[in-house]
Image: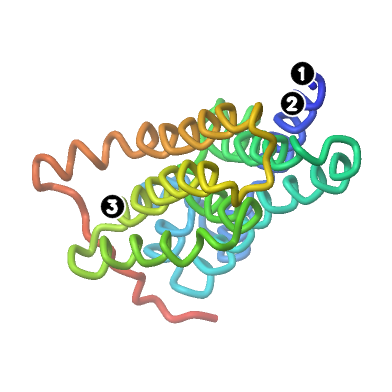
Amino acid sequence: MITSRIIGLVLGYVFGLFPTGKIVGKAYHTDLRKSGSGNTGMTNSIRVLGWKAGVIVFFGDCLKAAAAMLIVWLIYRDICPEAVKMLELYAGVGAVLGHNFPLYARFKGGKGIACSVGIVFGFDWRMAPICAVLFFLSVVPTGFMSLGSLGILSGFFVQTIVFGQLGWLKVGAQFLPEVYVLAGILTGLAFWQHRANLKRLASGTENKFAPSKKKED
């Protein structure tokens, strides 16, 4: 099983390296790493390039994690059905690590939120509605995307534990603690990548979400 875990993690990391934001930015003749916040994720794409580009980046990043998880499921669904959900989560964690810390960019990547949304749907789509509610309840009144992003991951972490304890995850009891740890790692990564945002929120200097007004092609 150790080998299976490593395979899931490495496979996810490779998928996470796909530079969605860089490719979309290039199509718009813009280097997102040198524009706005310097991040290549959805939020900065919308701010700099507009909604169309941001949505493309969002779905591209979601698919990186979801595709890696799907491949792991196809490989292990019959070999170890009680552990396959855990192995999917390893692939998801790997995808976020690849997105956040890509080798080709000196380990400076995005924040992994869109990838994490892909993980939510790939792991158990029933968690998506609560995560969406937490996102909008955080963003709509405040205008802070960072709060919404952290709401998604916090919701995922809590629901993973609740679903696991209720027996809804189809995971062997011996693997549940590891699943909880992996969900905690994903949530911890999100908070770590947003540490600068949290400092700005605490000091009252965080930027509110403001889409680009540039005309879409």
Number of the front mark, 3 or 2: 2
Number of the label disc, if any, that sits on residue 175: none
2 to the left or right of 98? right
- The vertical placement of 71 against 82, above or below, is below
- The vertical placement of 178 against 118, above or below, is above
Q: CA distance from mark 3 to mark 2?
A: 31 Å
User: Label 2, on which residue?
Assistant: 5
- The vertical placement of 151 against 198, above or below, is below
Q: Indicate the amino acid at tag 2.
A: Arg
User: Label 3, on which residue?
Assistant: 147
Q: Indicate the amino acid at tag 3.
A: Leu
Question: Residue at (73%, 36%) from the top-left corner?
Answer: 14
Question: Residue at (77%, 35%) from the top-left corner?
Answer: 11
- Tell me where residue 189 sits by quadrant: top left
Q: Position of residue 6 (x, y in %)?
A: 75, 23
Q: Are marks 2 and 1 in contact (CB under 8 Å)?
A: yes
Of callouts 1 and 3, which one flags the residue occurring earlier in the amino acid sequence?
A: 1
